[in-house]
């Protein structure tokens, strides 16, 4: 009887141990890393050889519901290629969701080939408040290439790409659309712009085309693009990769990044700064040039705008070199700044090297957004050759002083399912797909199941791991499209807004994890930016939400709301705001200006301020230790029982 009781106790304790470690070992990988087979959602191609996941992108909020959306390319499906749109949502992500379950499909034209070889979020190209999409078909018409613009709307629907909102036709043999990217607002006119790479033009010299956004985007031949950037030499393959770089030098214009991995000394990456009148150039005249260290390392084979990785207020750059050091591969981080010396891009600030030869680290690179809400942008690096081409992806968290490292020491590692799946061939920041305020990740594995292909969504688990599901990522931008007059309340980015008057128009709410203004507290957290197109006198009531874990150790009764009408101005207390500590809300009624900032603190944020803006976080509880202690005690009991039974009776 004692033995049966002992066995039962063991089963209970062992089950407790498994429950304690299940999230770390067998649950969704989250920010601790793990197998991609356990991702929050898995999307699978419909047929063998589709190449689903060859390209992946977080495309922003395409339908204006407050959740960021995903676009995944399958360029070999049916010969013409298909791109799949999955709309973000609070819940309902499936662990094995087929391509057929997508919210919308975009089919290549029957006479053309390879659509979806590249996909990207274009930003808001026409200024209607919806995020738009780019789909590349570089093999179209004997490698002339073709790119499609698909405009966002409240109800995205499936369609053949012959019905795309605009088409951009490449020059003969150029492979236009080999890479595509949203460039941001390069010329400061209020419309987001587009980049199209064509690495095959003129004996593989390569070109990159800048197409400016407008209220009514139209079809055009890329030879008539607004600006054309020419490769330096034959064989450079300039335009193999392109990216919106963000505002690297802080002048208010979005900048662009172009990769040329075929450049003779190992590849190059070029930075071209935005201006009110962008003009074409040959890339030897680019504003910044970075060159690979060794021959044939494919430096510039992948490029990305990294976001503000070190929190200094300037956008940073990430460049991959998958063939570096016997295809060990690495990615290089270049920091933005106003200092003109930066523009020489002489050497990277930090490098991240593959864990072993053949890993091909840097096969793909992406800015991940702020996955843990600390105010620093994070990085995602794909290594498609890792472990017999199983493929891995690595997450590196931003910090004030990013340091070079081997990727074996990455903040999190996401491992592919099996040999030849090539996970990490494409990676992307997914935006905030589930609306919890933290940025999520997307990883493509086009080799899965004989190139049927898969893509994996990794949702950030940071909010839940630190005492609450709330909070918002730094720079997470949300949008509501409203009619005129009294409108129903809506909640975005931790803010509930109830407009009782005003013109029809969009309201943008951006939540930053920290301010970069020198007079603000260094770690200034709960900071909201409200941009209203509803007119200057729209009456509104705002309710700002905070979580207990964000004010741990502070005097909650002393929390106040502060506001200002321009970035980096002095903060003014909102004396009409009311605090409800039972619901963790601060409420303010006002007449809005076109631009306002709000923050919660115990004192006006400044060098000596202490408040919610400090983001004092409690570490996640670790239930596994309780189970381990119990297991050790149980084992000691077993030993004692065995020794007692071994003693002579009588």
Image (cartoon, grey):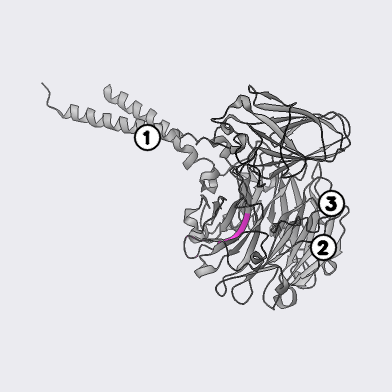
Horizontal and vertical percent position of residue 26? 49, 41
Name the residue at 75% across, 63% down.
Answer: 196
Of marks 1 and 3, which one's residue comes earlier in the chain? 3
Q: What span is in magenta?
A: 353-366
Quadrant in which the N terminus is drawn: top left
Which of the two discs, 2 and 3, sits closer to the camera?
Answer: 3
Residue 109 in sight here = no
Q: Quadrant of residue 593?
A: top right
**How many other residues sit within 10 Å of disc 3, few (<14), some (14-19) or many (≥20)?**
many
Along the horizontal axis of the image, is 619 left or right of 56?
left
Q: CA distance from mark 2 to mark 3?
A: 16 Å
Q: Which mark is residue 160?
A: none
How crowded is the residue under tag 2: few (<14 C-alpha within 10 Å), some, or many (20+)?
many
Residue at position x 62%, y 26% in the image: 558
Q: Position of residue 351 (x, y in %)?
A: 54, 61
Tell whether position 129 is magenta: no
Find disc 1 in the rendering and name its residue: 628
Q: Secondary structure at mark 3?
A: loop
Q: Residue at x 67, y 77 (%)?
A: 235
In the image, 267 versus 611, the foreground residue is 611
Disc with the residue nearer the chain's start (1 vs 2): 2
Disc 2 is placed on an element classified as strand
Q: Is residue 137 left or right of residue 609?
A: right
Q: Position of residue 579 (x, y in %)?
A: 68, 24
Tell which tag, 1 or 3, sits nearer the viewer.
Answer: 3
Image location (x, y in percent) of residue 230: 75, 72
Residue 126 marker: 3
Q: Is residue 603 visible?
A: yes
Q: Provide the residue designation for mark 2.
A: 168
């Amino acid at each position: 009887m004692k033995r049966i009781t002992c066995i039962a106790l063991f089963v209970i304790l062992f089950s407790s141990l498994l429950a304690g470690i299940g999230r770390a070992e067998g649950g969704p990988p989250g920010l601790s890393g793990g197998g991609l087979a356990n991702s929050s959602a898995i999307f699978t191609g419909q047929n063998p050889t589709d190449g689903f996941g060859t390209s992946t992108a977080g495309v922003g909020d395409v339908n204006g519901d407050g959740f960021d959306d995903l676009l995944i390319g399958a360029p070999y499906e049916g010969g013409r290629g298909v791109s799949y749109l999955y709309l973000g949502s609070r819940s309902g992500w499936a662990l094995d969701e087929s391509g057929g379950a997508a919210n919308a499909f975009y089919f290549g034209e029957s006479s053309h080939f390879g659509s979806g070889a590249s996909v990207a979020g274009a930003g808001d190209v026409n200024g209607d408040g919806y995020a738009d999409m780019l789909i590349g078909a570089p093999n179209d018409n004997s490698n002339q290439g073709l790119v499609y613009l698909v405009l966002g709307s409240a109800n995205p629907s499936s369609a053949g790409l012959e019905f795309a909102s605009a088409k951009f036709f490449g020059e003969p043999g150029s492979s236009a659309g080999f890479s595509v990217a949203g460039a941001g607002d390069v010329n400061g006119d209020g419309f987001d712009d587009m980049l199209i790479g064509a690495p095959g033009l003129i004996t593989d010299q390569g070109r990159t085309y800048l197409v400016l956004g407008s209220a009514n985007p139209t079809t055009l031949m890329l030879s008539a693009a607004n600006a054309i950037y020419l490769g330096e030499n034959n064989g450079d393959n300039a335009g193999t990769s392109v990216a919106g770089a963000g505002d690297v030098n802080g002048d208010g214009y979005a900048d662009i990044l172009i990769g040329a991995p075929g450049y003779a000394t190992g590849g190059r990456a070029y930075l071209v700064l935005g201006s009110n009148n962008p003009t074409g150039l040959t890339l030897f005249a680019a504003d910044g040039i970075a060159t690979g260290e060794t021959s044939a390392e494919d430096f510039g084979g992948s490029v990305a705008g990294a976001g503000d990785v070190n929190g200094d207020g300037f956008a940073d750059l990430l460049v991959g070199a998958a063939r570096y050091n016997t295809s060990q591969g690495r990615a290089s981080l270049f920091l933005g700044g106003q200092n003109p010396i930066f523009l020489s891009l002489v050497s990277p600030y930090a490098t991240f090297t593959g864990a072993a030869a053949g890993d091909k680290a840097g096969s793909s690179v992406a800015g991940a957004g702020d996955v843990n809400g600390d105010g620093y942008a994070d990085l995602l690096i794909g290594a498609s050759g890792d472990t017999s081409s199983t493929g891995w992806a690595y997450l590196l968290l931003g910090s004030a002083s990013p340091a070079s490292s081997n990727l074996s020491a990455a903040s999190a590692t996401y491992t592919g399912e099996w040999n030849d799946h090539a996970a990490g061939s494409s990676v992307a920041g997914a935006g905030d797909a589930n609306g919890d305020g933290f940025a999520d990740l997307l990883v493509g594995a086009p080799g899965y199941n004989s190139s049927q292909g898969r893509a994996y969504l990794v949702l950030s688990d940071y909010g839940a791991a630190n005492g609450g599901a709330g909070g918002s990522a730094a720079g997470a931008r949300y949008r509501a499209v409203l009619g005129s007059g009294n409108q129903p309340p809506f909640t975005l980015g931790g803010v509930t807004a109830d407009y009782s008057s005003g013109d029809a128009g969009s309201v943008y709410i951006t939540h930053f994890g920290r301010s970069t203004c020198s007079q603000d507290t260094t770690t200034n957290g709960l900071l909201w930016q409200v941009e209203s197109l509803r007119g200057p006198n729209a009456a509104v009531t705002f309710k700002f939400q905070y979580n207990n874990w964000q004010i741990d150790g502070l005097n909650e009764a002393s929390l106040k709301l502060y506001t200002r009408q321009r970035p980096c101005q002095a903060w003014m207390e909102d004396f009409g705001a009311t605090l409800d500590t039972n619901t963790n809300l601060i409420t303010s009624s006002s007449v809005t200006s076109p631009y306002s900032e709000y923050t919660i603190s115990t004192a006006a944020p400044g060098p000596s301020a202490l408040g919610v803006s400090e983001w004092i976080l409690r570490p996640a509880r670790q239930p596994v230790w309780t189970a381990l202690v119990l297991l050790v005690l149980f084992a000691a009991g077993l030993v004692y029982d065995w020794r007692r039974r071994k003693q002579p009776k009588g």
